[in-house]
Amino acid sequence: MIRAGAAALRAWSKARGWAALSTAPPAPPAAPEPRREEPPVPPPVPPPVPSPVLRSCRVPVVPPLSPLQAWVGSLRHPEDTLRGLADLHPDVFGVSPRLDILHTVATWQRNYKRISHARVRSRAEVRGGGRKPWRQKGSGRARHGSARSPLWRGGGIAHGPRGPTSYFYMLPMRVRVLGLKVALSAKLMQDELHLVDSLEMPSGDPRYLQELARARRWGHSVLVVDSDEFPENIIAAASGLKSITLIPALGLNVHSLLKHQTLVLTLGAVTFLEQRLLWHESRYSPLVPFSLPHRDPPPPPRAA
Amino acid sequence: MAAVRALLALGVAARRRPELGPAGLRAFWGGRRKEEGEVEADRAVPEKAESSEPSLIHPLPRCRSYIPPEDLQSCLECHVREVFGPSVPEDWQQAPLQENRLKYRLLARLAAELGHAVPNSQLHRVRCAGDVLGFYRTPVKDSTEIDELAAAELPPNLKIIWQQ
């Protein structure tokens, strides 16, 4: 009551006149107010969904393997976690936990972009040192040929870092693909994977997303992956938070998966990942590297 | 004249004898560096939950605690009969959950009623109603080991305090 009165007086003092003292609730502002102290009021609990969201694997699951499953939730309300059930392909989300592959791929990600610019001068590059400092015999001192040899103070370095060094190397494509599969399987097995039917949010307030992550106990950091474009609300909300990151499905990588505690995938992203990651299991070796322009092989001739 | 007096005052202040106590000596030898280092270290501590709380905060519990109710079996049986309808086999615990629609309906009802849902990692293991019963019989606690240690009897010289 007092807060409503104070808000009304504040609005009146901004020269809105007697209309500010109307008892109707004020319209919600388009942009979030910077001085608002109360947390945003969550929308009312939605009624139970009559038709659940059921998703089956697009790529057929060959027996004896059986598909893994996960709940499908949504971001429209913090309590809206059980909207449906989705099947996940076991060859993507249920591979054995190869920690050595995770380490290999994470190390590769860190190192292949590295260029070390450390460079020190050798005895040939240090200024001076062309003349023999003293005669070879008779002066009583040790024999030297140059004042800039590695033995001397101010001399060159014998086996130091030489120039920009590149640590570029490529792991085989199948190893990198397996690394993604192992990381996704680890996320599922540790209950850190959550599925969402779409990323629509009721508001673009970062606090709403933060409250949602805290209510659902997602952890300190969340990685949100979608295959299509992101809605504006979630872009606005995530840009205000450091702990929630949005990436497209093409940008999924082992380092990000390990760095963030929770992974949130949309159903479109799951389909995309399953298709792309499973194709490598049954493909031929390329005649031309995939990075070069190439044509897909012609389909096998059908027996007439 | 006023400038000369100010200079004299500065000179006198600079020539003032430093205190010979431990605080004075610490200040003399650069005790300020510690405070600056502490401030930098505080700033370098990663800000969790978008607020400037210290890192000794109690970690967020990852799962809610769950204690199985006493009438779990009868409650589960009536839910199974509701969901399956006439096609429920004689032993209701053998009712298969292969169809995703039935599985979703049963597990969503139980989650709404008991406040505890089957986590994603266990969903593929729940294949019949008996598995569901076995899952809902196991209690889940959300307190960490340190909390249990703090609640237990400790020797008098050991204290465990979480900074709130």
Image (cartoon, coloured by chain):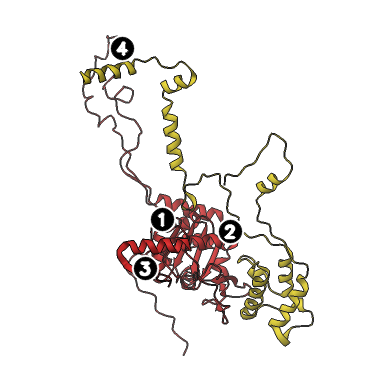
Chain colours: A red, B yellow
* Rendering quarter of residue B75: bottom right
- As drawn, is A284 to the left or to the right of A146? right
Q: CA distance from mark 3 to mark 2?
A: 63 Å
Q: Which mark is residue B7?
A: none
Quick one: SS at disc 4? loop
Q: Earlier in the sequence, mark 2 or mark 1?
A: 2
Screen quadrant of the N terminus of chain B: top left
Q: CA distance from mark 4 to mark 2?
A: 66 Å
Q: Amino acid at mark 2?
A: Pro
Comparing labels 3 and 4, the label whose residue is closer to the camera:
3
Residue A55 vs B145, above or below: the answer is: below
CB under 8 Å between discs 3 and 1: no
Q: Earlier in the sequence, mark 3 or mark 2?
A: 3
Q: Which mark is residue A141?
A: 4
Q: Position of residue B130 (x, y in %)?
A: 74, 72
Q: Residue at x 41, y 24 (%)?
A: B30
Q: Which mark is residue A97?
A: 2
